Image (cartoon, rainbow, N blue to C red):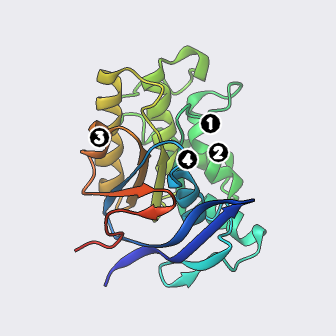
């Protein structure tokens, strides 16, 4: 099997609420997987456990054969900067930085010199239709342009897995369609796997496979056929 990321028997509780109940899921290299479900179903909790943002109460998470849920927070934080990329619903770009520095930020946090980090960041602007916008700040970009900057930031470190949490939730239908196309194409071109949390079937259709979550359990198989 060429699984890049796998969660095994994942459970997570918040007080009396069971957010995850024995979830098994595996993501293959280069695969795009949609995690669907209504609000409160456990889909975002699953993403956070897989991404090392939170630890499951029990179960294991493995990235390329290494167990990450048992790592210390400092190790998981470094992992999130280098091996994972993230695209959120509202982009979460830093408003005081120009677009090119927003993209370069993960590299600089990893110790790459500013000049080299910005040079690498600029390479993403043309392919993502952002040529000439390197110096614009987030407030000078449209919603779709800002999400494309966020996609570039997620991919600039050449991660193994990109996590996207409702990446089109703040966009109109046409812009959302274009954003998902770019996200899937750019991620696959970069050789990364993609996990998209969404409640929108139109977004899920861009992915290779859909996993449905209800009440902390998977209604569809978490493993590829």
Q: Neighbour class for label 1 at 10 Å: few (<14), some, many (≥20)?
A: many
| Residue neighbourhood size for the residue with mark 2, other residues' Cα within 10 Å, grouped as few (<14), some (14–19), many (≥20) | many
Q: Quadrant of the C terminus?
A: bottom left
The front one of 178 and 214 is 214
Q: Are marks 4 and 1 in contact (CB under 8 Å)?
A: no
**Which residue is tagged 2?**
105
Q: Which residue: 49% across, 84% down? A: 65
Task: Name the image quarter holding residue 55.
Answer: bottom right
Secondary element at tag 3 = helix
The kind of secondary structure element at disc 2 is helix
Mark 4: secondary structure:
loop
Which residue is at 53% across, 57% downward? 47
Which disc, if any, is residue 40?
A: 4
Q: CA distance from mark 2 to mark 3?
A: 32 Å
Marks 4 and 1, how far apart at CA: 35 Å
Give the structural element (helix, strand or loop) at label 1.
helix
Percent x, y of residue 208: 24, 57
Q: Earlier in the sequence, mark 4 or mark 1?
A: 4
Q: Which mark is on residue 14? A: none
Q: Is residue 219 above or below residue 58?
A: above
Residue 156 in view of the camera:
no
Query: Does 123 sit above or below residue 160?
Result: above
The residue to which callout 3 is attached is 201
Distance from label 1 to label 2 (Cα)?
A: 6 Å
Q: Nearer the viewer, mark 2 or mark 4?
A: 4
Which quarter of the figure has residue 128? top left
Kindly identify which numbered label has been placed on residue 101.
Answer: 1
Q: Going from the N terminus, do you reach mark 2 or mark 3 first?
A: 2
């Amino acid at each position: 099997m060429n699984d890049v990321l796998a969660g095994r028997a994942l459970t997570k509780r918040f007080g009396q609420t069971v957010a995850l109940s024995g979830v098994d899921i595996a993501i293959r290299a280069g695969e795009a997987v949609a995690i669907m479900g209504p609000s409160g179903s456990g889909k975002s909790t699953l993403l956070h456990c897989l991404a090392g943002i939170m630890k499951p109460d029990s179960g294991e998470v493995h990235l390329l054969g290494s167990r990450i849920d048992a790592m210390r927070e400092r190790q998981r934080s470094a992992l999130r900067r280098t091996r994972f990329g993230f695209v959120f619903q509202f982009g979460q770009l830093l408003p005081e930085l120009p677009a090119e520095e927003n993209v370069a930020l993960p590299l600089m946090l990893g110790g790459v010199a500013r000049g080299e980090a910005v040079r690498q960041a600029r390479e993403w602007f043309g392919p993502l239709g952002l040529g000439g916008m390197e110096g614009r700040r987030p407030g000078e970009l449209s919603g779709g342009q800002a999400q494309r900057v966020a996609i570039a930031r997620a991919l600039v470190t050449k991660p193994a897995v990109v996590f996207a949490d409702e990446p089109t939730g703040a966009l109109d239908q046409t812009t959302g369609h274009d954003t998902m196309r770019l996200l899937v194409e750019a991620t696959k071109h970069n050789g990364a796997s993609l996990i998209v949390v969404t409640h929108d079937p139109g977004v899920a259709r861009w992915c290779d496979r859909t996993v449905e979550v209800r009440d902390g359990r998977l209604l569809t198989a978490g493993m590829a056929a």
